[in-house]
Every structure is written in structure tokens, then in C-alpha cells.
Amino acid sequence: MDLRMLSGVTAGAAAGAAGCAALDATTYLDMAVRGRPTSDAPAETVEALIKHLPVDVPGTNSRRHNRLEGLGGLSGSLTGISVGAAFGLLYASGWRPPLPVGAVVAGLTAQALSDGSLAGTRVSDPRTWSLTDWLSDIIPHLVYGAVTYATLDALERGGR
């Protein structure tokens, strides 16, 4: 990998981390405004995945639950940073759509990976979600995409 590509991946990972912070803030704002609880889906997804691995999460009752919650949050961050890194590689390769297009594509990519893991592990079936469920999912992911792509663009333009 040449230096330009490595720089793109690094800038993309940093942009993805910024996008994760924006997604989390948007989600927490939604929870505060509507009074809705946190989602158990990330922890349940990790638990479903672990069943297929030669490892287990230690602890009983609340300790194990807390570890799964932590791993669920980390998996979301890993997804967001990885999507950012991939978009950084694409950007460094010359794919530079206008901001609205890049933002939507980045957001929907992250959402597809997240929702795909929910469906693939049978934790949730997005086909059964209500409009409110979909809005609670897509809005934070679009915010993620906007912040990720705008940050990537700013970092890469500043590096020239």
C-alpha cells in the first residue's frame, strides 16, 4: 500500500471515529427527547456471534451482561471506524462524490452492516420494524455518514 493510500485509510479511520461520536450523540439525544431505553440489540448480537466462536464472555448475571454491553458498543465503534477507513481508501483512490452523495453512501453502508448483523444473527428482523424504528435507525446513521464524509474530505483537502 503506498503512502497516499495509507494516509487515506488513516484519515478515514479518524473520520469514522468522528462519525461514531456523532451517531452516539444523535442516539442519546433521541433517547433523552423520547424517553426511550437503550437498545439491547448490540449486546444480543455479540452474544449470538460468540456462540459460534471457541470463546465465551466470563461472568454471571450482571457482570456478564455488562461485558456484553461493552462489547456491543465496541463492535459499533469498530464498524464505524472500519467503514470510515474503507471510505478513506476509496477517497484516496479517486472516488470523491459530492458531500451529500458521499454522506448518504457512508451512512447507508454503516447501517447495512449494522442491520445485516442484526438480521444475520436473528437478533432482530428489520422487515418487521415500524416507521419509528426505522427513523430511529436511519437518522443516526445518516448523521454518521455526514460527519464521517465531511471530516474525511476536510482531512484530505487539508493534507494537500
Image (cartoon, grey):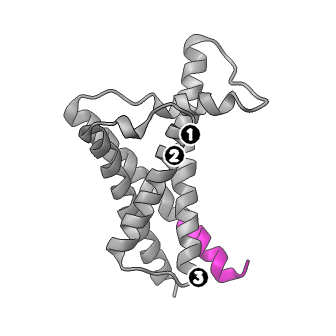
Query: Residue 116, which numbered label?
Result: 2
- Badge 2 marks a residue whose secondary structure is helix
The residue lying at 28 percent from left, 29 percent from top is: 36
Up-down: is 159 above or below 16?
below
**Residue 104 seen in the current view:** yes
Q: Which residues are magenta?
A: 1-12
The relative height of residue 82 versus residue 3 in the rendered view (above or below) is above
User: Neighbour class for label 1 at 10 Å: few (<14), some, many (≥20)?
Assistant: some
Residue in the foreground of this view, choosing between 84 and 111:
111
Circle 1: element type: helix
Q: Position of residue 92 (x, y in %)?
A: 57, 80
Please name whichever residue, 123 or 38, is drawn nearer the observer in this view of the structure: 123
Extreme bottom residue here? 160
Sequence-wise first label, 3 or 1:
3
Q: Provide the major secondary structure of the magenta segment.
A: helix
Q: Secondary structure at mark 3?
A: loop
Horizontal side of residue 83 vs 29, given as left or right = right
Report if the CB atoms under discs 2 and 1 are less than 8 Å apart: yes
Which quadrant, please, contains the N terminus? Answer: bottom right
The residue under label 3 is which amino acid type? Answer: Ser
Residue underneath mark 1: 120
Answer above or below: position of 159 versus 35. Answer: below
Residue farthest along the left direction in this orientation? 33
Near-viewer residue (146 or 156): 146
Would residue 66 be found to the left or right of residue 126 on screen? right
- Depth check, mark 3 against mark 1: the one in front is 1
Identity, as a three-letter code, of the amino acid under mark 2 = Gly
Residue 93 - label: 3
Residue ID at (58%, 27%): 68
Numbered disc in front, either 3 or 2: 2
The percent coordinates of residue 86 (x first, y second) are 58, 66
